[in-house]
Amino acid sequence: MNFTRWSARLPGTQRRAAARDDRSSVPSARAEYARPGTGPRPPDGDAQAGTGPDPLDDAQGAAPRPAGPALEGLSARDILGRLPALVALVYGPDHRIAYVNDAYAAAFGPRPAGATAAEAMPELDELSLLPLMDQVLRSGTPRTVKSRKVRSGNSYTVTCTPVHRDSDDGTPPNKTSRTTRSGKCDRGRGSGLGGERGVLVYAADVTDHAEAAERLRASERRHRETAVTLQRSLLPQELEQPDDLRIAATYQPGGTDAAVGGDWYDVITLGAGRTALVIGDVMGRGVRAAAVMGQLRTAVRAYARLDLPPHEVLQLLDGLAAEIDASQIATCAYAVHDPNEGRLVYSSAGHLPILVCHEDGTVHRAEDPTGPPLGTGGWIHTSGTIELPPGSTAVLYTDGLVERRSEDIDEGVAALERALSGAKGSPQVVCDRLIRSLGVTAEHDDDVAVLVVQHPARTGASAELFHNASLDLLGGIEAAPRARAFATGVLTSWRFPVELCDLGVLAAGELVANSLKHGTPPMRLGLRRTDRRLIIEVTDGDDHLPRRRRADPADEAGRGISIVATIASSWGSRRTPGGGKAVWCEFALSQ
């Protein structure tokens, strides 16, 4: 086969035959750009620099540069055969082999001329090039695929270029097809009357680059897996389940292209039936954000044990966040549920509003954040309230659930409200439905944390397990006997065992006596039964919190709290919002 009859059909390619045509009336390009004073060059001279002596060199007395071989004297086989890249030339609709260079033969072995690529070149099938070559042959447009791997393990970037074989008489196939500046074959005139079309396959070995990229991706995957593992290990492994609430949470890290953030949630039982709910988001990505998140979550649990109002907890957390990292800020919402009040008392540090869906499907949004993000300092946080009656559902969430690059975040919160109004079922079902409704997938570009809290409306036999009773205590020596008589009657009516009734009456008497001695009016005794515990609580108007101490044998007082702590499962005290304190104890019920 006359290999020099093949020419690449690339945009702007000039034919050699046209360059050799002495009868052309158009001056050649080298004559148009000849240097002044050099005179016209021979029409068939070489157009490449360095192929002949330069008159300017002779004028300056410099030695003439040696003339290299003329481009017309080199065959395409000589040029392509010395390329380190892999080159193959096929022709016809069956892609029959016309030529492979030495690099191609060294990589895949020699290929018989005239055989079809589908039969004799399985490596093209491994690279998924056969359909691409059909497309290139039909469209006349070059195509490139990057970093394809073959079975041997090597990776190649391959370019398929349409080529055309000149007719046998040496004239260009102008009446058959021509290549436009865009690289597409113009088959509008005399298609099929001239030479034969083919495809030049040019493959560059990019194995080293592909392996380096894979090592980089593997390193990024390991880094991400480390951050995800750290993030998940710092989140609650099992949520605490209060008596009066049903809670579920979901955390979903961002997709593979997104680094892990610092989203977290938590549920903390405070005693006396009260529960703290926490949701937060540390700004930033990666292991650092996850580590800061872990420190803040641990601090929240410690501050929650102090049973402080929500705004005081965030105030303490704000100072700690600045100490951990002055450049790191975080948003956080901290809410406390008291079953006796039927509402959430919350404080928010720059976090998104809590949503509450009532039993009839109406959704209420908590007021705007009551303070800036944690770590900013210099701000006094305040607390707000939102109703959480029986039958309602509250949702705490991070911005990954509602924030989208193409829309305002308020639109995302509104979409969440619509999804919440129609979400029914258990808390975990509601979690899953909200995530699906907001379009969060495994490839989401941000972390998502969702905490769903349901306050179930109990009826029938379930309602019989939950009771409340309270008594306002007036000062005087008759308050203690009245409290013991009240406790005895209530516990007996709730059908507790005699032993538990006796312990409950003893604890109630000691707490009331402590309040009469150290507290101020108004005083109140409260009894609460759940399906798992008996809660006894006494409130008064003095904010001095009691503490357990060891009484000396000669002391006549100081043993009340020690007695309560000994007989009860747990006890504690807290300051109440209106000024004063509450002292409580719990007894676990046998299941």
Image (spheres, rainbow, N blue to C red):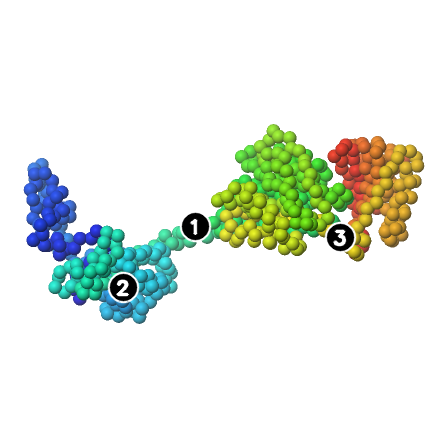
Residue 456 at x, y = what percent? 72, 51
Labelled pair 3, 1 in contact (Cβ < 8 Å): no
Q: Residues within 10 Å of mark 3 (few under 14, many from 20)?
A: some
- In this rendering, the label closer to the viewer, 3 or 2: 3
Task: Name the amino acid, label 3.
Answer: Arg
Question: Circle 3 is placed at which residue position?
Answer: 458
Seen from the viewer's position, the closer of residues 176 and 218 is: 176
Quadrant in which residue 204 is drawn: bottom left
The one nearer the camera, 53 or 193, is: 193
Q: Crowdedness of circle 2 by 10 Å Cα count: few (<14), some, many (20+)?
A: some
Residue type at mark 1 is Leu
Question: If the image is split into quadrants, where does the C terminus sit?
Answer: bottom right
Few, some or many C-alpha atoms within 10 Å of disc 1 (few <14, some 14-19, many ≥20)? few
Q: Residue at x 44, y 51 (%)?
A: 217
Residue lying farthest top? 378
Identified by mark 2, the residue type is Ala
Label placed on residue 216: 1
Residue 173, placed above or below residue 570: below
For residue 287, say whether it is visible: no
Q: Can residue 527 be spotted in the picture?
A: yes
Sequence-first tag of 3 and 2: 2
Label number found at residue 105: 2
In percent of width and height, residue 30 lies at 12, 46
User: What residue do we see at 79% from left, 56% from top?
Assistant: 460
Query: Mark 2 or mark 1: which comes first in sequence?
Result: 2
